[in-house]
Image: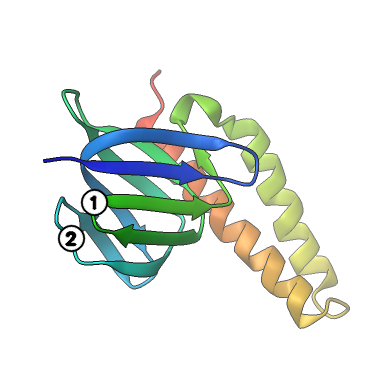
Amino acid sequence: MAMHFKIITPMRTALEADVLSVHLPGTEGELEVLPGHAGMITSVANGELIYRPVDSEPASLFVGGGFLQVQHDDVLLVTDTALEADEINADTVEEALKRAQDALRNSASVLTREEQTKLEAAIAQQLAMLEYNRKRKRP
């Protein structure tokens, strides 16, 4: 028995496949969705998502924060980012991380709480992306 899995970002449908399982980082901890899972909506954290397509080996993506909906055997992830390791340029991510850290460090006293929260979220996502990239990138 399989589930229909779809990942949507603001820019594209990143994945649409029939899968046997989905393992991902929830904001309250890791979670795995299998066929017949109870319906739910939950928040997703930055990190590695591993899915097992029908008749194929497991595959993974880096996903940013978002929301996961499970309804019957339809699984939908709405996220700001979904990238394979080969799509991540570590140099670019490290540069963006440095800019965000510098902005937070040098402008903390003049930033609104909302601006500070956005910078902190960007830093957390970039760090998680680098960790995923180091783990999954082929030499």
Between 5 and 133, the residue placed more toward the observer is: 5
Residue position marked by numbered label 1 in the rendering: 73
Residue at 19% across, 23% down: 56
Quadrant assignment, res 116: bottom right
Query: Horizontal and vertical percent for residue 92?
Result: 67, 34
Q: Amino acid at mark 2?
A: His
Between 94 and 16, the residue placed more toward the observer is: 16
- Residue 52 showing in the rendered view: yes
The image shows residue 37, relative to residue 62, as above or below, that is: below
Residue at 16% across, 23% down: 55
Lateral position of residue 72 relative to residue 101, left or right: left
Which of pointers 1 and 2 lies earlier in the amino acid sequence? 2
Residue position marked by numbered label 2 in the rendering: 37
User: Residue 124: which numbered mark, if any?
Assistant: none
Residue at 80% across, 61% down: 103
Lateral position of residue 99 relative to residue 25, left or right: right
Between 38 and 32, the residue placed more toward the observer is: 38
Tags 1 and 2 in contact by the CB under 8 Å rule?
yes
Between 6 and 31, the residue placed more toward the observer is: 6
Residue at 62% across, 58% down: 123
Label 1 – label 2 distance at C-alpha: 7 Å
The image shows residue 88, relative to residue 30, as above or below, that is: above
Choose mark 1 or mark 2, whichever is in front: 1
Query: Horizontal and vertical percent for residue 39?
Result: 26, 67
Label 1, secondary structure: give it: loop
Query: Horizontal and vertical percent for residue 133?
Result: 45, 36
Q: Amino acid at mark 1?
A: Asp
- Residue 135 showing in the rendered view: no
